[in-house]
């Protein structure tokens, strides 16, 4: 009775009404605060608010765009110069053009389907393991400007989707360009036009999803910091498969006969310094680990170049510039899967391995295989990538991995399971890349020849493209001298 009277009291009713009013005002205030438009900080207020959202790290975005451009320069013109200088003069235009076309073709398919195949949400799962991405387009403007979400876990990065698409594109582009070096001086250019986009979609994107995008091999525990497996082992095995599928050059045309060592030198320099973006960009930002990766990359490269030079002196009796540059490339490849996971001491070990094991593969193993890998892509990328990937399972240092992958450690620090899964992942890449690459070439071969015509093989660039690197060569080869201009 008293309680009923209390509730009916005008004072109680007034108090309850006041409390309800305060709650309503509080809710309205919170709602109003939530609806206040985002205002960029003063340093960025010259941009429209949607251009600099609160999830965007502008410093990391600037570095990632720069890193991607450095990697792009590794392909165009770096690799084109490197391979173009190593090949015979009459095929130098064709070699560079194969690189140029490959770069362009991959960008188109990457935007339309390849990126989400390698880094999108999982379209195919087995249990909780992401097998393949969605292979959908990232061309719509709302997608380009959105926050990047990567892999089956849809990991949110502090970068726009367009930045990550660009950065990952330059990796996708250089991979088929790497094994151009195995099939130069004989491959039908028209067959290459078809092969590149198909290979990028069917081989590169699925392997990228498994080992770069957080897919099933990553979920099993395998790691590949910047592409020792996805790019280099993949390219090295594709080089073998392509050499088998296309067939060899004529016996008299085999071997390396560089036409311009200065082109090779410039190309090697672009590759070396461009690799700072290659490995330094993989933490997806301007972090401590990015700095460690850059230093480790350059240190391993220097050690490997010297190691290869010493192997040349021991095995060939003299140091060679081509050898030292080859050693730099194999060092870059060997450190790639480990750059942000190992200490500088680990980088030195990888440099020594990178300069010796591929050398042995090039001079001892390849002659026994009797395959025409024109510029030794399999030893330089396949063997070096495999070496680096396995040694990552040994040398991954928790003192370094704390900055990018806390808890990751290799066999040298008591975790032998990482070594085991690295070997398993290598086996997956080798088998998948070889058989799918070989199959693509054979299907294309049903519709057109995989080799150049006899005339193209004999004449070279002028028969293939109607161009020559030095048009005066014809007169010189026929014994005629170009007329001297009158003063």
Image (cartoon, helix red, strand yellow):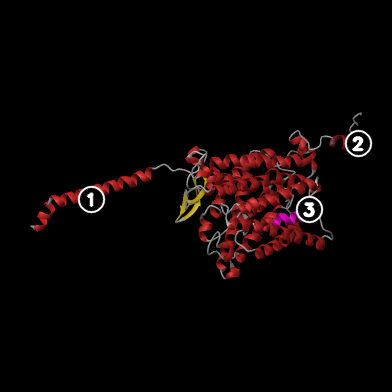
Q: Residue at x 64, y 42 (%)?
A: 103
Q: Which residue is mark 3?
A: 322
Q: Nearer the viewer, residue 486 or 49?
A: 49
Find residue 19 and name its label.
1
Element on which disc 2 rests = loop
Find residue 479 and name its label.
2
Q: Earlier in the sequence, mark 3 or mark 2?
A: 3
Q: Position of residue 75 (x, y in %)?
A: 67, 45
In-image side of 88 versus 165 (left or right): right
The answer to which quarter of the image holds residue 392 is: bottom right
- Stretch of the chain drawn in magenta: 321-331
In-image side of 119 versus 373 (left or right): left
Find residue 259 and name its label.
none
Element on which disc 1 rests = helix
Q: Position of residue 464 (x, y in %)?
A: 74, 36
Q: Marks 1/2: CA distance?
A: 105 Å
Q: Marks 1/3: CA distance?
A: 84 Å
Q: Residue furthest top?
A: 486
């Amino acid at each position: 009775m008293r309680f009923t009277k209390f509730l009916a009291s005008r004072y109680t009713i007034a108090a309850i009404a006041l409390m309800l009013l305060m709650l309503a005002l509080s809710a309205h205030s919170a709602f109003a605060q939530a609806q206040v438009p985002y205002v960029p900080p003063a340093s960025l207020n010259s941009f429209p608010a949607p251009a600099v959202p609160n999830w965007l790290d502008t410093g990391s975005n600037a570095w990632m765009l720069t890193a991607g451009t450095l990697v792009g320069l590794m392909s165009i013109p770096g690799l084109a110069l490197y391979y173009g200088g190593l090949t015979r003069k009459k095929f130098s235009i064709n070699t560079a053009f194969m690189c140029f076309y490959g770069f362009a073709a991959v960008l188109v398919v990457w935007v339309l389907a390849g990126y989400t195949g390698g880094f999108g949400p999982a379209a195919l799962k087995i249990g909780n393991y992401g097998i393949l991405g969605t292979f959908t387009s990232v061309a719509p403007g709302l997608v380009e400007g959105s926050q990047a979400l990567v892999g089956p876990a849809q990991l949110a990065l502090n970068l726009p989707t367009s930045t990550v698409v660009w950065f990952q594109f330059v990796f996708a582009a250089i991979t088929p360009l790497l094994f151009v070096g195995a099939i130069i001086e004989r491959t039908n250019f028209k067959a290459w036009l078809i092969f590149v986009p198909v290979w990028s979609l069917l081989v590169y994107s699925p392997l990228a999803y498994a080992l770069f995008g957080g897919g099933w091999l990553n979920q099993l525990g395998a790691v590949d910091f910047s592409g020792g497996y996805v790019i280099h082992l993949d390219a090295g095995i594709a080089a073998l498969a392509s050499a088998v599928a296309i067939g060899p050059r004529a016996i008299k045309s085999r071997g390396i006969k560089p036409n311009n060592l200065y082109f090779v030198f410039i190309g090697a320099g672009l590759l070396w310094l461009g690799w700072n973006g290659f490995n330094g960009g993989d933490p997806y930002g301007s972090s401590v680990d990015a700095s460690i990766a850059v230093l480790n990359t350059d240190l391993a490269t220097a050690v490997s170049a010297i190691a290869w030079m010493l192997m040349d002196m021991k095995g060939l009796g003299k140091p060679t510039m081509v050898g030292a540059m080859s050693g730099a490339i194999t060092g870059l490849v060997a450190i790639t899967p480990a750059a942000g996971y190992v200490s500088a001491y680990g980088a030195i070990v990888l440099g020594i391995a990178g300069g010796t094991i591929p050398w042995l593969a090039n001079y001892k193993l390849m002659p026994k295989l009797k395959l025409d890998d024109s510029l030794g892509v399999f030893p330089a990328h396949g063997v070096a990538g495999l070496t680096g990937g396995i040694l990552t399972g040994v040398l991954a240092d928790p003192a370094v991995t704390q900055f990018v992958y806390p808890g990751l450690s290799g066999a040298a620090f008591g975790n032998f399971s990482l070594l085991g899964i690295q070997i398993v992942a290598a086996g997956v890449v080798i088998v998948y890349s070889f058989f799918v690459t070989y199959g693509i070439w054979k299907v294309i071969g049903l519709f057109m020849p995989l080799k150049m015509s006899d005339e193209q093989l004999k004449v070279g660039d002028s028969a293939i493209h109607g161009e020559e690197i030095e048009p005066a060569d014809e007169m010189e080869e026929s014994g005629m001298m170009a007329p001297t201009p009158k003063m």
